[in-house]
Amino acid sequence: MVLAAHDRLSRGSARLARSFRSPLHDERTAAMLGIALGVAFSVCFLTGLVSHALQQPGGWWVWPTRPIWLYRVTQGLHVATGLASVPLLLAKLWTVYPHLWAFPPARSIGHGLERLALLPLVGGSLFMLVTGVQNIARWYVWPFNFTAAHHAVAWITMGGLAVHVGAKLHVTRRALGGEALPSGPPDDPRGLSRRGFFGAVAGAGATITVATVGQTVRPLRGISVLAPRDPAVGPQGLPVNKTAAAAGVTESIHDPAYRLVVDGRVAERHAFSLAELRALPQREVRLPITCVEGWSATGRWRGIPVADLLRLVGAPPGATVRVTSLQERSRYRVSSLNGRQATDRDALLALELNGEPLHPDHGFPVRLIAPNRPGVLQTKWLSRVEVR
Ligand code: HEM
Ligand code: HEM
Ligand SMILES: Nc1nc2c(c(=O)[nH]1)N[C@H]1C(S)=C(S)[C@@H](COP(=O)(O)O)O[C@H]1N2
Ligand SMILES: [Mo]
């Protein structure tokens, strides 16, 4: 009886395979979409790891302060490539789904392991794209920490991908090489051709890109109708993720007793009033805010170079700096500058944006702005600068 059932399933699966005769389900299509996905996921993985490393404290990480636009490019690429992967992944899964019902499920132990690796690969890929899209749409519906889960599953997915590439290398070579494909029934002339299918997938990818990339490529903002952010919309012409009201600082930032405390390894502890800060020599720089969520926008910032302040308070050479916000509870209330970042001329304690005192939502009275860093590290509403 078991044998009879086995026989029926085998025949059923063979019949299913025969019913997918279109070239859209063949190995050449699967291999070409696979390579495109492999490249896209590698770009996402590497740029994601960069973004992760930049947010870890510790001086071991050597990331330059220049060019000032480097992180803007890597994170913009992360989100744009991830979004363009959505049609690629759907097309790939549609192409190979007849394989998923193959029976017997494993022809050998090796084949079984290869198929088991599809679980983290397919599940992980879907999870990465879904959580990524939810994150940039700021739709925080999960009970777990988004970033941590997105990061952990990235490793799992890439592990599955490595096994998959190893297992499919031979078929990929055969499918893309000059060798004749195993003879099959002729293409159905009524169906979509492979070229037409790739055209549709590429068109969907291009449409998604153009419809969203304007959140970081400003000239395209007019046509980026699906972008979560318009880089020109917000107080003083710049977007805001966390407003002063949402951060609970509307009163403390206007307190007449406000002081910016500078302490730590300094000759003497200082407490500057806003008027005293304004009286110090100022510098103006053009720098982007680059949100980890993929939007970015350039502003004209004016304030006190961190390096000047360090000299003024007698900090030792090579000192690192930790800034703290008036905001009481947030993952983003503190951030650090290593020695290289703290001595860059363009790292400012900014008091003005685009020619006006900072808007409360942009960090009034003082915020940090420094070149080539994730937006989450550009701390707003500063209360303390600690020299370490
Ligand atoms: C996110 C990335 C990827 C996903 C989710 C994915 C998913 C799948 C799935 C579910 C199958 C069907 C199961 C099977 O045939 O064993 C498959 C088959 C295949 N994949 Fe991938 N794949 C990815 C990347 C790649 C890459 C990078 C390559 C090329 C090096 C590739 C080449 C192939 C080939 C040649 C097949 C067999 C097609 C056939 O036998 O007709 N895939 N893929
Ligand atoms: C639509 C697709 C994707 C979108 C929209 C997206 C979006 C994001 C965002 C917004 C972050 C920053 C999170 C934060 O710091 O708060 C991020 C981080 C990251 N992403 Fe993606 N992502 C996508 C796909 C992928 C893929 C395919 C991979 C790898 C296979 C990947 C790997 C990572 C990694 C490793 C991080 C760093 C996490 C950390 O800082 O700990 N992402 N992604
Ligand atoms: N104290 C504090 N600073 C913060 C944040 C925050 O939530 N709290 N958000 C950060 C994030 S995620 C970004 S992208 C930038 C955005 O700066 P903007 O609102 O001036 O554009 O501020 C950063 N500074
Ligand atoms: Mo951000």
Image: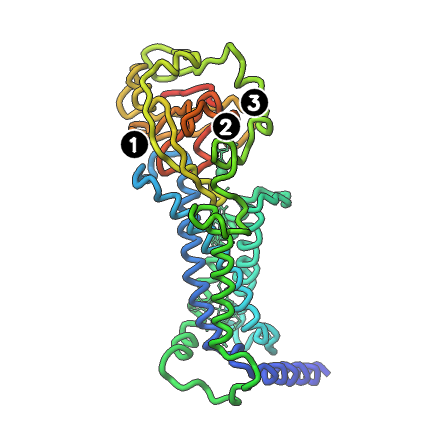
Front: mark 3 or 2: 3
Residue at image point 47% right, 40% down: 291
Q: State the residue at coordinates (30%, 20%).
A: 308
Report helix, strand or loop for mark 1: helix
Judging by the rendered image, the residue that carries numbered circle 3 is 249
Would you say the residues marked 1 and 2 are in contact, meaning their CB atoms lie under 8 Å apart? Answer: no
What SS does tag 3 mark? Answer: loop
* Disc 3: residue Cβ within 8 A of ligand 3's nearest atom: yes
The residue carrying pointer 1 sits among few (fewer than 14), some (14 to 19) or many (20 or more) residues within 10 Å by Cα, namely some
Spatial CA distance of label 1 from label 3 is: 31 Å
Residue 206 at what x, y percent from top left? 47, 61
Q: Which residue is mark 2?
A: 333
Which one is closest to the eye, mark 1 or mark 3?
A: 3
Instruction: Identify the residue at image location x=49%, y=65%.
Output: 203
Q: Give whichever of 299, 53 is nearer the camera.
A: 299
Is 68 on the left-hand or right-hand side of 139?
Answer: left
Front residue (pair 96, 114): 96
Q: Position of residue 367 (x, y in %)?
A: 44, 25
Screen quadrant of the C terminus: top left
Q: Position of residue 341 (x, y in %)?
A: 32, 31
Classed neighbour count for the residue bearing mark 2: other residues with Cα under 10 Å, few (<14), some (14–19), many (≥20): many
Give the amino acid at mark 2: Arg
- Disc 3 from disc 2: Cα separation: 12 Å
The residue that label 1 is drawn on is 340
> Which numbered disc flags the more N-terminal residue, 3 or 2?
3
Q: Cβ of disc 2 within 8 Å of ligand 3?
A: yes
Q: Please report the residue visible at 61 percent of the width from the left and 78 percent of the height from the top.
A: 103
